Amino acid sequence: MSARIALLAVGAAFALAAPSAAIAGGPSPSQISKAVNTAEHSKQLWATVNVCTSNHHHGLLGIRGEIPSLGFASEMSMTFEVTYKASSADHFKPLRSTRATVAVGQAAHKVLQVGRTYPFQTSSMLLAGRVTFEWRRSGKLLGRTSRRTTGRHTHVDFSDPPGFSQPFCRLH
């Protein structure tokens, strides 16, 4: 009977140690999947137009994104792309040569923002943006998702004017 109790105690100790061992050596596939799913559905994952023909930045379009970390160390990046809709078009199309990837940084428990600014001549086209968010660990892709620019975000850094957050921009 005591051998059986000892065996159960060893099994219980191993079961309790297994999750911490997985985290110590890195998150398990299940933990990664859950963390990426949580980040993809977070209100802290967004893209917005934060600059659109202001007095200080005439002829500039600014696109900014925010990305939450996964709860364990990972490298985060954002790929920005300007999209446009001509007056006769019914949907937005990518604007060639505007795609740019920015390394956001490495974090475990932070929400980070970064953006890109693009110079434009005045145009009747409606401009917007698309941001693709990626999380990597040791170079391995953990997750990727994209968002079109939306508005009404709060605490958008480097907005012009302060607090500016819109889904679209028409340069005049």
Image (tube, helix red, strand yellow):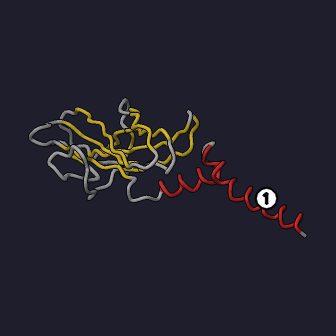
Residue at the limit of the structure toward the top, as seen here: 97
The quarter of the image holding the C terminus is top left
The residue sitting at 39% across, 48% down in the picture is: 110
Above or below — where is 165 with respect to 25? below
The quarter of the image holding the N terminus is bottom right
In the figure, is residue 138 to the left or right of 55? right
Q: Residue 101: image x %, image y %?
A: 41, 33
Residue at the limit of the structure toward the bottom, as seen here: 1
Q: At numbered mark 1, what does the secondary structure look like: helix, strand or loop? A: helix
Question: On the image, which quarter does residue 132 sit in?
Answer: top left
Residue at the spot of label 1: 10
Above or below — where is 143 with respect to 98? below
User: Label 1 crowding class (10 Å Cα cut-off): few <14, some 14-19, many 20+?
Assistant: few
Q: Residue 122: image x %, image y %?
A: 17, 37
Q: Residue 51: image x %, image y %?
A: 21, 44
Of residues 152 and 11, the one nearer the viewer is 11
The residue sitting at 78% across, 63% down in the picture is: 9
Going by the numbered disc 1, the residue's amino acid type is: Val
Of residues 101 and 172, the one nearer the viewer is 101
The residue sitting at 46% across, 46% down in the picture is: 108
Q: Residue 82: image x %, image y %?
A: 34, 39
The residue sitting at 50% across, 41% down in the picture is: 74
Residue at the limit of the structure toward the front, as seen here: 2
In the figure, is residue 165 to the left or right of 95? left
The number of numbered badges drawn on the structure is: 1
Of residues 23 and 46, the one nearer the viewer is 23
